[in-house]
Structure formats: structure tokens, C-alpha cells
Amino acid sequence: MTAAAATPIAVQRVAVDAARLPNHAFGHQSVMWWGTVGIMAIEGTAFALTVFMYFYVWTRVDAWPPDALPPELRWGTLNVAILLASVLPNYYTKRAAERYDLRGVRIGMVVCLLFGAAFIAVRALEFTTLNVSWDTNAYGSAVYLLLGLHTTHLVTDVADTAVLGTLMFTGPLDRSRFVDVSENALYWNFVVAAWLPIYAVLYLMPRWL
Amino acid sequence: MSADGSAGTLAAHPGRDRPAYSARERYGGWVDEPGLLGALATIDHKRVGVRFITTAFGFFVLGGLLAGLMRLQLSRPDSTLIGPDLYNQLFTVHGTTMMFVFAVPIMQAMGVYFVPLMVGARDIAFPRMIAYAYWVYLFGGAMLFVALALNIGPDAGWFSYTPLAGPQYGVGKRSDFWAQLITFTEVSGLLVAVSVITTIFKLRAPGMTLNRMPLFVWALLITSFMIVFALPSVMMASTALILDRLVGTHFYNQAEGGDALLWQHLFWFFGHPEVYFIFLPGLGFVSTIVGTFSRRPVFGYVAVVLSMIATGFLSFGLWVHHMFATNVPELGKSFFTAASMVIAIPTATQIFCWIATLWTGRIVLKTPLLFVLGFFFILVLGGLTGIMLAAVPLDLQIHDTFFVVAHLHYVLIGGGVFPLFGAFYYWFPKVTGRMLNETLGRWNFWLFFIGFNVAFFPMHILGLQGMPRRVYTYAAESGWGTLNLISSLGAVLIVVSVLLFVINVVRSRRRGTAAGPDPWGASTLEWATSSPPPPGNFHPQLAVNGREPLWEPDGVSGRVDGLTNDPPEVLVTTLLDASPHHRRAVPAPTIWPLLAAIATTVMFVSSIFTPWAVVWGSIPIAIALIAWFWPTREEAAKHRKRELPA
């Protein structure tokens, strides 16, 4: 009372009645979306810089790769296929989350996790066919850094999905968790999208350029 | 207004006429548990923000004491007080502290405290992440000083050039501590940046369109974007450095196809924008203070905003001007010279806007404005030497001399620290409810201003005379003794000045004049709530209708109803127009961000000694993060109760 009397500004008028608004939202209206996109911007920049490092050390030598064959194509290329295929269940999960379809979300997340596990397994094989070690030369260092960075994202995202997926089975749940599922799917798309240029840099560039 | 309005929005009399409600009854879930556990678990952006600011200021004092030791050593020729090895650690830890542990974090910390209040939000976005970012930052800074105390502090300079910092020359663990400090501060800085961007984009008070945002908020928004795109560069640089050192990669090893210059490119691609992480928030403080103490809106709002955006972009195109003494192509150097000169234009635009504001306003000359006027003087001098250094031939001549030391201190202390002190005086009443003492404030300013110029102006001349930076002593025959002594006396004045500030803070916090909600008669929303603001900031939240809501007749268009305190809810608004979109429940306070930060620290520090720590150290972090994320039944039930019927 005293406060209102002491200041000329009236706040008696109700400008917004928030009780009529929903308590969560999907997509770019959600705060979580901005958090996820922010992290993607940071990590996308880190990927881009690592690619820059790869090409920078390329300019320091005459032949590329120096004293080694390029990484073998089969496992990396298989992973491109697995990752591209994983976009489908991922899309399905996102759609299911956005219509609050708990059963669909559960199925979708399990399938996504299987894809993630397959990808990690093939990634392990990929590391065995790089034809270079991180301590051989700067080329090897750059290859390992690029692949290692992507693998870190892969493992973290699969772990995230596993935790969130478990929560979707066990609860406690409220509807805002479906927003988390939707953002988690967005992040997986980023991991997929990042792999395509990295694959091109690691596997195709040494052959084509 | 309801009776509980006496603390909260537009309150005038904190402490009086308060109904006998407990804080918990009035503010519900916004209130922390009492005691130590509550303090450790808090995710209130104001408590975390004050901690962040205080910690960063503590590191400023520590870094300043290291500088004091260096000035003591250099005050006379042929001094044997401090040996070369310790001196190397002193200047490295001084520079590293001031850039990574003081300046950038304190600017972000000011954002953590004030951005939510200035945009009229009840909370910051991702408050738990902010708490985690603070703890990680604290532990990282502590690690640096523990290393220094154990005589294993980094010693290769604050930009840690390879090969000096690489495995061939940087033996021992010193440069590893440097690289891991970078890891700590980048994790913290990036998380704060994402949180600040999201707060600005999505939590503004209804009606605060982008076009009505306070200029300080614009400054923090642009800075945060720059951090998102620049910090990853030093992150990759220092990761590659520590990999070279610990597992034998060859990124910077010339002999195996690497390149030492790669380090310089990566470092300065981050390092030049970093100057602007410090400078842009400084510009934001200046705009805020100039407006309030001229009693009028800042002249040329759009020009100021566009200038800051232009500065943000241009700052990414300057990094090679730190590398003029290397073998980068001459044509490239010309480009970077031109870019370095172009960036003077947006800065000048802003300075002219402020002059116009002051010229046409009714000036109230209080301590915050004094610091801003000091900023004008010092920054203009630093800018002029910047234009000199941007010219390749001159740069080659005075590269690595004290001229550069003088320049960078004029720019950073003038552009960052003077506005920051102005901001301390300006916002202290908001944070504590009490005014800082004005007389002590004037002493603080004049001693700092005079002391600064006495300490740093002679360094220009010393540099032109050829005194190199980073030498632990010099011969009497060089003739540099007098100017060095003058410089050291100036440093004494700065120490006294900062001491007066600390005394002022300690005294005023308890015994200063009561401030009331809006002691300066300012225009922005943080002054519409009580001082200090209650948990949850605004009760009720306000909707605005103009750029200077507390100055315009209908600036505050009304209140927001229908947000609960239990669970604590914030209003999420749309990006451009800030029209109300939905409610969002804020998570409860929790100890897990602290535990996750401890686990993170264990991993980062252990990885200096064994690379396998990255593997086993991730397990406790993962456990802490899962516990942090996992909702309680009670929380979920509360959220369900607030859902709209399907």
C-alpha cells in the first residue's frame, strides 16, 4: 500500500494473465531450444576450427596424407549410412513427443538408442582402420582430434538419450518432459549433420584433392 | 497492490510496514533453505551473481598484487629482489588472471546479476547451469593460484606461445596448469553466455521489444554471441597444446608437420575478440551511466546498438595484427591494418553519441559519472596508440616493448575497469540497499585516475626507448631507472585507491545511507523493484510500454498476473516483440551443480597428470549430472498441477 502511494506508477492494471497460457512450448519458443541451439553453435564452431586445423597442417607438407594411406573407406562410409538412417526414427520420436504420445516416444527412443549403439560399435572399428596414429605426425594428430571430438559428442548424446529414455519409462513425468525429448532429437540431428562434413574431410578430401 | 508489496516491485520502504509473513510465505519456491546447505545449493541468479562478482574482484586484487610485486622489482635497475624464474611466473599469472579469471568473468557476472533485472524477468534462464558455471570458475581460478603458491605456476606468458609452452621447452607441469585453467574458464564462460542470450531472447518483460532493450543488455547480448563463437578457438588451441604435451601429438611441432604459428592463429582468433568481451560490457556501463546522470535518454540509441554490433563483427577480423612480427604474408598484414583502423569508427560513433547526450542533458556529477569521464580520457589515449600499433612498420619497431604494455593497459583498464568501477558505484545500492560513500568514492576515483596515468604513461616512453616487456630487470646504464620509479609510484596510488574502494564497500554495506528502490531516479526496470531485490525479483512482474519505462508516463503498462511462486514460474515471451507466450517452471535449488563442479575439477586437474583421468573422471561427472537432471515426484506433481487442461 505504502509502496503504491510512494510511486506515481500504477500497476493496478493487469496487462497479462499468465494463468491462461500453457506451461511449456515446443521448438524455438521454448527456452530449452535456445539452450540446445547455443550448445550446437559452440560445438559447431569447435568442429569448424578443428577442420581449419586439419587443413592448416595440410599446407605445411608436400604430400597428403604424409607417409600413409588415407583412412579405409568401409567403416566410415558404413557409419554415414547408419547415421543417415537414424534420422528416420529420430524424426518419428520428435513427432511423437510433440503430440504427447508416450508409447511412441518410448518405442522411438529405444530404436534411436539401438542406432546410437551400432554407430559407436562401428566407430570403434573405424579407429582401427585410420592407417595412422595420433603421435605419428601432425596429420595423425588432426585426424584423431577430429574423430575424437565427434566421438565425444556421439557418446554424450547416446548417454543423454539413455537417461531421458529411462525417465520416459519410469517417471516421474510431466508434459514438459516431452519438450526435452524433442530437443534431444534436435541435438541428434546436429550430431548427424556434423558427421557428414567431417567424413568428407577425413575420408574423401585426401583422395580427391 | 497487495499488502505484501512492500518488498517487491516499486517498493519504497524495505524493512517498514512489513506484514508478519515469512519469506517462504511471501515468495514460496524462490526462497533458499537457510544455513550453509541452502547457501551452497542456491541457484538464485542474484546470490550467484554477487558471489561471481566478489570472487572475480578477489582475483583482481590478487592479480593486482602480483603486478605490485613486479613494479617493486622494476622500480630500480639491477634489482635482485625477484629472480627471473619467479618473475616469469608473476607476469604470466598476472596476465592470465586479469584476462581470464577477472575481466571476462566479472563482465559476465555483472550480466548474471543485472540482465534478468533489467529485462524485468523473475529469473535467469538455466539457473542451475549458472550455479555450476560459478563453481567451476571458482575452482579453476583457485587451481591457478595453488599452482603459483607451489612454484609450479605457468611461466610462458598469458598467451602461452608455442614452442616455449610446448613439450620441448615447457618442461614440468607449468603450462599444463595454464591449459587446464583455460578449460575451466571456457566451460564457465560458454555456459554463462548461452544462459544470458536465452534470458535476453526469451524472458524479457512483456512489451520490451528488442528495440526497447536497455543498452547494457544489448552490450551483454553481443558479447555473449562473441563468446559463443570465439571461445571455442582457445578451447581447441589449448586442447591441442595439452595433447602435444601429454600424449605426444604434433600440432605445434615443426619437425613432424605441425606449426607453431597455428597456435598464434587459434589463440588470437579468440584473443582479439576477447578484448571486446571486456570492452563491450564497458560500453554498456557507460551508456547506462551517461543516460542516468544526464537525465535524458542516450542520444542515438539505434546508432549505439548498430555500432556495438559492428564492433562485434569487426573484432573477428583483427587477430593477425597481433602477429605482425611473424612471417604471415605482407598483403594479409595490410588487410589487418585496415581492419584495425576501421574498428575505430563504431567506437567513435558511440563516443559522439555520449558527448551529445551529456551536452544536451542536465549533468549530475556523481562518482559513477566521474569514472565514465575518466574512461573517455584514458580510452581515447589507448585508442590513439592502438592506431599507431595497427601500422605494420611502427609495430615491428615497438613489438614486445613496454609501449605495448602501456597500450593494452590504457585500453583494458580505461575501456573495462573504469566503467566497471562506475558500475559498482551505480548499482551497489541496488544490490545492498545502501549507497556507497560519495567522498570516499571521489578519493577512489582521483587516486585511481592519477595513479593510473602516472603508472602507465611513462611506459609509452620506456617502450619507445627500447625497454622490452617481460624482463625481470635492466641495467642502470640503460637510463630507464627514473621512469620506472615513477611508474612504480603510480602503482602505489592505484593500490591505495583500490584499498579505499574496499573500505568503502565494507563500511557502506552495513552503515551506508539507505538507498530506496531508485536512488538515482533512473529509467530501467531493475530500479522498479526493491533494493536489494527479493527472491523472484518482481512481485508482481511488470509489463512495459517504452524504452525508458520509469521515465515515460505510461512506461509501465501494467502487471503480470497468474504466475505462481510454488513452483516458481517465469513468463516466456517471443523473441522480437516480447509478447507473452507461455509459463515455465524454474527448477528447485539443488546441491548437484556444486557436486558436478567438484567432479569436473577432479577430472580436469587429474588429467594434467594422467590422460586416463578423462575416462574415469567422466563417470562421477555423469552421475552428478544425472542426479541433477532427475526430477523428484513432488516437482513433477507440482508441474502437472500447473498444466492447462488438454
Image (spheres, coloured by chain):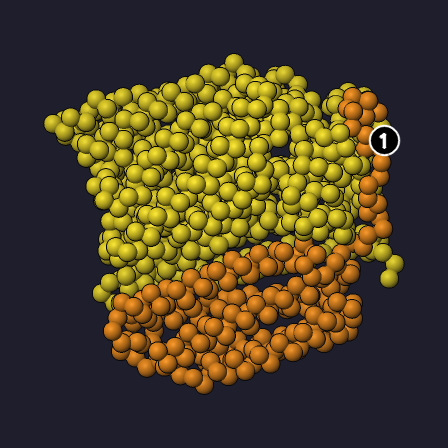
Chain colours: A orange, B yellow
Q: Quadrant of residue A81?
A: bottom right
Front one among A113 and B276: B276
Q: Residue furthest left?
A: B477
Mark 1 element type: loop
Camera sees residue B173: no
Specify the subunit that label 1 lies on: B
Q: Quadrant of residue B134?
A: top right
At 28% from the left and 56% from the top, the residue drawn is B331
Q: Quadrant of the N terminus of chain B?
A: top right
At 75% from the left and 21% from the top, the residue drawn is B13
Picture coordinates of residue B456, whole percent (x, y): 32, 28
Tell me which amino acid carries mark 1.
Ser
Q: Quadrant of residue B517?
A: top right
At 75% from the left and 26% from the top, the residue drawn is B11
Picture coordinates of residue A88, whole percent (x, y): 65, 78
Is A124 drawn above or below residue B640 in the view shown? Answer: below
Q: In this figure, which residue is indicated by the disc labeled 1?
A: B2
Picture coordinates of residue B156, whole percent (x, y): 29, 46
Is A206 drawn above or below residue B245 in the view shown? Answer: below
Front one among B627 and B559: B559
Is B576 drawn above or below residue B622 in the view shown? Answer: above
Q: Residue furthest bottom?
A: A74
Give the left or right position of residue B247, taking residue B587 as reference: left
Picture coordinates of residue A30, whole percent (x, y): 70, 56
Q: How many neighbours does mark 1 have within 10 angstroms: few (below 14), some (14-19), or many (20 or more)?
A: few
Q: How many marks?
A: 1
Q: Residue furthest top?
A: B439
Give the left or right position of residue B642, taking residue B405 as reference: right
Camera sees residue B613: yes
At 32% from the left and 63% from the top, the residue drawn is B251
Q: Quadrant of the C terminus of chain B?
A: bottom right
